[in-house]
Image (cartoon, rainbow, N blue to C red):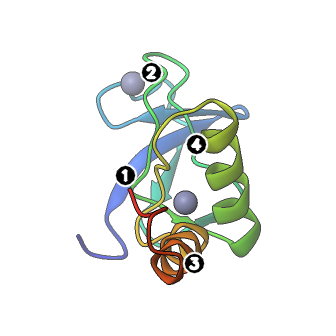
Amino acid sequence: MKTYDVVGWVYDGETYCLSHPPAKISKGPIFADSEWDYYPVCGECWERIDAVSLTGDGVKYEHESAKEHGVECPVDSCVFCRDESRRAALKPGEVK
Ligand SMILES: [Zn+2]
Ligand SMILES: [Zn+2]
C-alpha cells in the first residue's frame, strides 16, 4: 500500500469505502496516509476503512471502544495492546 493510495471517499461529512463511491463529482479522496481520530466508516455498508492512519487519540479511541464492546482491537500494531501484552507477560499465569 502506497501512502498516496486512495482508500475511500468523503462527501458531505460522510465517508465511503472504495466499493461505494458517492455518485457526486465533488467527492474527495481519502488517502492511505491521512490521519484520523477514529476509523472512518462507510455510510453505505458500515465497513470500517482501516487502511488510513490514526492519530494518537485515534488509536486510544479505537482501542478503548473495542474493549468496551468486547471485540478485538482493530488497530494495527496498537501501542496499548502492546503495553498490555507486555504487562501480562510480566505476570505469569495471566497470559492468555
Ligand atoms: Zn461501503
Ligand atoms: Zn489495541
The quadrant holding residue 67 is: top right
Give the residue drawn at x 43%, y 51%.
50
- Residue type at mark 3 is Arg
Q: Could you say where residue 4 lies in the image, as x and y percent from the top left?
A: 36, 73
Q: Say left or right for 71 vs 96.
A: right
Discs 2/3, front: 3
Tag 3 secondary structure: helix
Q: Is mark 2 within 8 Å of ligand 1?
A: no
Discs 4/2, front: 4
Give the residue drawn at x 41%, y 65%.
76
Q: Would you say the residues marked 2 and 3 are in contact, meaning their CB atoms lie under 8 Å apart? A: no
Residue annotated with mark 4: 40
The residue lying furthest to the front in this view is 93
The quadrant holding residue 72 is: top left
Q: Residues within 10 Å of mark 4 (few under 14, many from 20)?
A: many
Residue annotated with mark 3: 87
Q: Say left or right for 26 vs 49.
A: right
